[in-house]
Structure formats: C-alpha cells, structure tokens
Amino acid sequence: MRGLQGKTAVVTGASRGIGRAIALRLAAEGCKVVVNYHRNAEAAEAVVDAIRSQKGEAIAIQADVSDAQQAQRLIKESLQAFGRVDILVNNAGTTRDTLLVMMKEADWDHVINTNLKSCYNVTRAVLRSMMKQRYGRIINITSVSGITGQAGQTNYAASKAGMIGFTKSLAKEVGSRNITVNAVAPGFIPTDLTADLPQDLKDALLKLTALGRPGTAEEVAGVVAFLASDDAAYITGQVIVVDGGLVM
C-alpha cells in the first residue's frame, strides 16, 4: 500500500485474532508496529517475533486500554520508542452475551468499557501528537452488530454502534488537520471472540451471507491497511463493511 513504509502504527488488542492479523499486515507493508495487549504477553511477543522474523520493527506494550492512565502510558511509550504515531487501530474488544433481562450490570460495564471507552481513551491520548504533526490515520474496528443489532448482544451492539458515532463525529473535528477517521465493520470472522457463539447462530449467519462462507482476519486486515494508506487519503467518516454480503 502506498505511503505506509516507515510509518508507526499502534494496534490495540493485537495479540490475537483480527488485531494480530492487522499488526502483521501493517508490518508487511513497512510499518513499525506497537503490539498492545492486556493479559497474554506470550501471544503478543509471538506477534512481535513474527514481525521481526520478516525484518520488520515491532514492540509489545502491555496496557489495559479501558483504563485512561494505562492508555496514556501506551501512547507515551510508543512515542518514546518510535518518535511518532501515524496510525491508530482501535481493535481491543470483548463480548459478554446474554439477553438483556438476564444481563448483569458488570457485564454491561465491562463490554462498554473495553470496546467503547478504550476507543475514547487511546484516541484522546494520541490525538494531540497527530494534530501537531498534521497527519494521522485512525481506524476503529466496529461490527455489523453495531449496524443491525443482534439478540443477546445489547451491550456489544451498543458499544459498536457507539464507535460508529464516535468515528463520524471525530472525522468532522480533525479533518482540517489531515487526520482521517474511519471504521471497519467485520461480519462473521472466526476468532477467539466468536468461538463461543452457538453453532445454530453460526449456521444462521452463514446462510445469510451472500458469499456462503465466513471471512478471515486477514481479509479485515487488508481493508485496514487500505484505509491507513495514501490510497485512502480522501476517505474519512466512513464505515467499511467486511462481511461477505451479510448486511446489505
């Protein structure tokens, strides 16, 4: 992708799944990558090792980005390591699915904080440096659930819908500083996050998918790389759906 060589990218929740694929793809395109993780240091270091084995540059930084102070530390350490942050991918996410009538307040708060508040925390922490350098690419990983809703996912869908509103509003705030803000909404992508979905729900999703197959984390990563590149310099405030035709 044009314009990615030598750029620095921070990817939250990058030790596994879609985040891992994004980190690997951006590194393959020439980015220096900060692999953020919360708990699994071994998995994060494996991503770093994979990048370095291809002669790329990467470091792993532990931070629970749902906590504002830790999010600020993540960006501070990223700037110390690489001098600037050009690309932020807000990917950290979780689910605690159940019907609302049975949903505990703790499950609501945990999903909102992990998915939506972390987006606010890390973006706010990096924004001044992007504005000062008059360049930035912010890409938020939302979900088709945030567009259509999904029974049993009121907390998850609300957090992902919130990310879409966040994306569009921030794009209007920072466009004059040459900062683009976009979102990517995956459909059914088999990862650790979707592993616990009931099989009948997975089957139903596939039946509704025009391409008749699940997507891959690498296919999502390709769209993220495009949005981070110069080829997408005139795209902002958009939600790109990567779902094989599940939502049309």
Image (spheres, grey):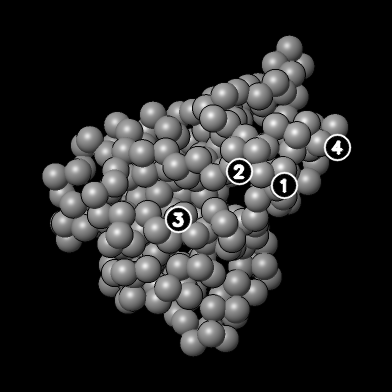
In the image: residue 137, left or right of residue 98: left
According to the image, label 2 marks what residue?
244
| SS type, badge 3 | helix
Rendered residue at 85%/37% (across/down): 199
Is residue 66 or residue 116 the one in the foreground?
Answer: 116
Can I make out residue 218 in this image? yes
Q: Position of residue 54 (x, y in %)?
A: 53, 85
Residue that extends furthest to the top in the rendered view of this protein: 101
What separation in Å lies between label 4 and label 1 (alpha carbons)?
A: 14 Å
Instruction: Decide: is 130 above or below 59.
Output: above
What separation in Å lies between label 3 and label 4 (alpha carbons)?
A: 28 Å
What separation in Å lies between label 1 and label 2 (alpha carbons)?
A: 8 Å
Of the numbered discs 2 and 3, the one sitting upstream in the chain is 3
In the image: residue 85, left or right of residue 246: left
Q: Amino acid at mark 3?
A: Val
Q: Position of residue 203 (x, y in %)?
A: 81, 36
Rendered residue at 49%/36% (across/down): 116
What separation in Å lies between label 1 and label 3 (alpha carbons)?
A: 21 Å
| SS type, badge 4 | helix
The answer to the question of whether label 1 and label 2 lie on touching residues, with beta carbons closer than 8 A, is yes
Of the numbered discs 4 and 1, the one sitting upstream in the chain is 4
According to the image, label 3 marks what residue?
224
Q: Position of residue 7 (x, y in %)?
A: 32, 70
Q: Position of residue 167 (x, y in %)?
A: 36, 37
- Quadrant that contains the N terminus: bottom left
Q: Amino acid at mark 2?
A: Gly
- Quadrant that contains the C terminus: top right
Rendered residue at 40%/58% (across/down): 226
Q: Amino acid at mark 4?
A: Gln
Q: Which mark is residue 199?
A: 4
Mark 2 or mark 3, whichever is nearer to me:
2
